[in-house]
Image (spheres, rainbow, N blue to C red):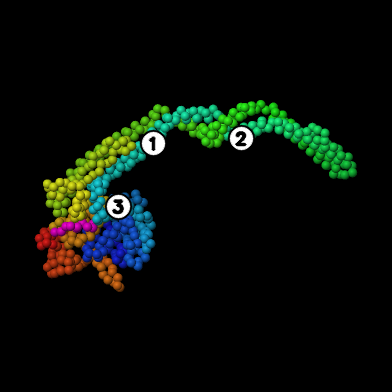
Amino acid sequence: MLAWLSVEGLALVESVELTLDPGLNVLTGETGAGKSLVLGSIGLLLGDRADAAWLRSGAARGAVEGLFEISCRPDLLEMLPAIDLDAARGRVVLRREILADGKSRAFVNGRSVLVSRLREVGDLLVDLHGQHEHQLLLQPESQADFFDGWAGLLGERRALEVERAAMIGEGRSLLESRERWERERGREAEIREDFEELRRAALSLEEEENLKRDRERMIHRERLHSGFAEARGLLGGEELSASDRIKRASRALRTLAPIEAEAEALSVEADRILEDVAGLDSRLERIERGAFEEPIDIEALEDRLHLIHRLKRKHRTDVAGLLSLRDQLDERAKAFDPSGRSLEDAERAHDQRAQAYELRLDAFTGHRADRFSAFEREVGSRLKRLGFGKASLRVGSAGADRSRPVIDPTAIPALEFAFQPNPGEPERPLKRIASGGELSRVMLAIKSIMAERDRVAVLVFDEVDQGIGGSVAEEVGILLRTLGERRQVICITHLPLIAAHGALHFEVSKTSRAGRTVTSVRPLEPAEREAEVARLLAGDRVTETTRLQARELLASARPGAKGRGAGARRLAKRGA
């Protein structure tokens, strides 16, 4: 239950705190006093869109905070960990703040959270029923939610929805695989041919550069020959060569040794240089001989380079890319299933999954159909209490479309509620009901039979008294009070015949304070409540007779009161 609610700095409210009853709480007040503000504040607490327009003029910040006591609801306590929430001591505190720049902040048990998390928690705790929910009742998907929730089939339906979504994804993947296989089959010969060509080419990463260097050497062979010959001649093969000059220098230095101590060392250094020159000459001779004795076939070399160039141009990549492509083509060739057997196996498994889904769907729709009559009877009995003497509600299921391809399995049939206000008149889809009062009573009838099955702790009603009065209003009040025996109910009403049934009655009023209008909400004492019910009965013309009628109405509305409803019937006869 919502044990405590605080509103600060919103609209006409400076600060309001409410301690609520676990049963039926009613709020009444003059038109424009701000009753809907309470409903809107609860909506903000549950994650509705926030706007700076909500703020009281001049306020830098507004806030709504609510304390939910759920220690007596183990079913809700078990569900909270699934949304990463721990209800300390069986309590959940929600808070919403709105800032002047339009931004808002949300808190659960003092921890800052995203508004989406606030909405998740709120969905578990409160069912906010106002004019918007009337419109939801007109939508087939919402009608299915109402019925499946009442019938206890929501879990199975959602499991079917998850299975269908998975099958659609799997079917699309298989379709893409089939299309890819068809393309691969058309290219199989080309893939294998390209792979064999690259395999036979036996390329290596450095081969192209090596071949280019060899070609350069072959093209400039004569230049290499003359260059090496000249170098060797200068080193030692001709008169006055480097070797000859170094030898003569060494001899000259040795003749100076007797008169210059360093001349001997220089002569030794010259001999060492002579050995290096001889080594260099030997290397030049080896390279020269190898260059001219190497059995290089220039024509074969050019053919090889041409092959590499052709393959690079064909596949638009370099040698490294050709080597990678060769490996890829090898894998594709090995993995290709010419018969498509593995794909056919996967498609067969998908078909079997679709057949199993169809069987589950048939069973689900059968379970639905089995519960239609019971739902119609229960709603019909509540409608009679709410002023529809012989009205009926029918549940219809759209036929399943079995012509869909495997990629799009049969959708779960939609439901549609049809309403017959009077015998002999044609049934009409609920969406064609023109009267908001009729629609609100149909919603109340459905909500009342779902109360025992709903997990939510709090039911909030607005607009439920639209277009009704007299004995029907009395029955609505009784029904709301009965709901309050199972769930906490908060109801905004203009009708005394509903307000009288509240376990706790709040008055919403406007006053002027320091030149500004302020909305206040306060619980009424018995005498004050009698005066408020009298005002609801007679407006500004409250008389002693009206007060007596209010007292009688309150007394007859008390649980267990004898002759319950007699006051309402007398008021109805008097035109109340």
Q: Quadrant of the C terminus?
A: bottom left
- The dot on residue 490 is none
Question: Helix or strand or loop: what does disc 1 sit on?
Answer: helix
**Can residue 529 be seen in this snapshot?**
yes
**Residue 562, located in which quarter of the rendered image?**
bottom left
Which residue is pictured at 25% across the width and 62% down the height?
A: 35
Q: Classify mark 3: residues with Cα within 10 Å, few (<14), some (14-19) or many (20+).
A: some
Callouts 2 and 1 close, C-beta under 8 Å = no
Q: Is residue 448 magenta?
A: no
Which residue is pictured at 37% across the width and 33% down the height?
A: 346
Q: Which residues are magenta?
A: 461-470
Please give left or right for residue 277 compared with residue 497 in the image.
Answer: right
- Could you say where residue 459 lies in the image, as x and y percent from the top left? 25, 55
* Distance CA(mark 3)–CA(mark 2): 72 Å
Amino acid type assigned to the residue bearing label 1 in the image = Glu
State the residue in front, 439 or 362: 439
Q: Which residue is mark 3?
A: 124
